[in-house]
Image (spheres, helix red, strand yellow):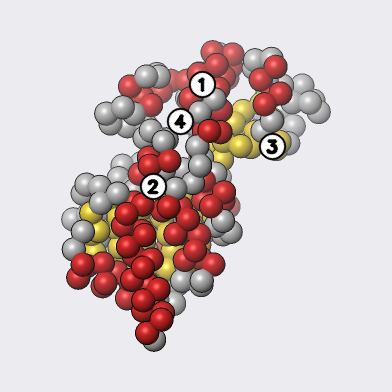
Amino acid sequence: MEELKLREAATLIFRSHHTTVFTGAGISVESGIPPFRGEGGIWTKYDPMVLELSYFLRHPEQSWQAIKEMFYEYYGKVKPNRAHEVVALLEKEGFVKAVITQNIDNLHQEAGSRTVYEFHGNYQRLVCLDCNRKLEFTPGIFDNLPPRCPHCGGLLKPDFVFFGEMIPPEVSRLSFAEAEVADVFLLIGTTGEVYPAASIPAVAKNHGAKIIEVNVRPSNHTRSITDIFLQGKATAVLDALWDQIRLLKATS
């Protein structure tokens, strides 16, 4: 991580009118959550078909068994890491206006972030496919698989986006609106491979935002839209960035 780039990124955020953070799986890896793709990823252990909506509707019990193992028996044990905490601190101090996340792990909220647009949903909510009620997850939901709605008996589904599902219109609208108003867009741990989410940073770039990217390796964004590439683990880079911003604040 080059000191000059770090100072330049900190200065952009410090002077910005509207910084938006955009996160992908890479920010949560250091909390112990594996990415879906790549070495050690979830799709090396499970068939992606279990998260296809059509398969889920035909085989809810099989899908729910895999979903229970993939998410509910695992995610509940993880905690926000320093990168999540710094993002929350930046919002608290007024430097960040919103977080758009592709992650469904709820770690931004647990770290203290308030304005979070969950582009792909949240595993801690369930939705009834019959009456459309949304419920908070409780462990008792797994007393019987597949879980059923306590109100109408309909099939419950995790309230995150499956393959074959559309992004919820309101969160999509809000996320793209953020991209249009931000003058700094801070990308953390996103590869730029999953659409339509991957198009959001490009919209920000096209509307004049400076793009700061934090990643352990170059992504699809790096050579196409990124202005400042800070290479390294999210926790180390965000902690160093926070130190630089605090220094600017102290000396301004």
Q: Earlier in the sequence, mark 2 or mark 4?
A: 2
What residue is drawn where x is 18% and y is 63%?
2
What residue is drawn where x is 51% and y is 72%?
94
Farthest-out residue, bottom = 252
Mark sitting on residue 136: 3
Position of 27 relative to 162 (above/below)? below
Mark sitting on residue 131: none
The residue that mark 1 highlights is: 69
- Depth check, front residue: 37 or 180: 37
The residue that mark 4 highlights is: 163
Point out the image quarter for the N terminus: bottom left
Position of 192 relative to 51 (above/below)? below
* Drawn side of residue 217 relative to residue 34, left or right: left
Position of 224 relative to 62 (above/below)? below
The residue that mark 2 highlights is: 27
The secondary element bearing badge 1 is classed as: helix
How far is the residue under mark 2 from the one under mark 4? 22 Å
How far is the residue under mark 4 from the one under mark 3? 22 Å
Are there few (<14), some (14-19), or many (20+) residues within 10 Å of tag 4? some
How far is the residue under mark 3 from the one under mark 1? 18 Å
* Drawn side of residue 50 relative to residue 114, left or right: left
The secondary element bearing badge 2 is classed as: helix
* Drawn side of residue 82 relative to residue 218, left or right: right
How far is the residue under mark 2 from the one under mark 1? 21 Å
Point out the image quarter for the C terminus: bottom left
What residue is drawn where x is 47% and y is 66%?
90
- Could you tell me the amino acid type at mark 1? Glu
Q: Earlier in the sequence, mark 1 or mark 4?
A: 1
Q: Position of residue 217 (x, y in %)?
A: 22, 47
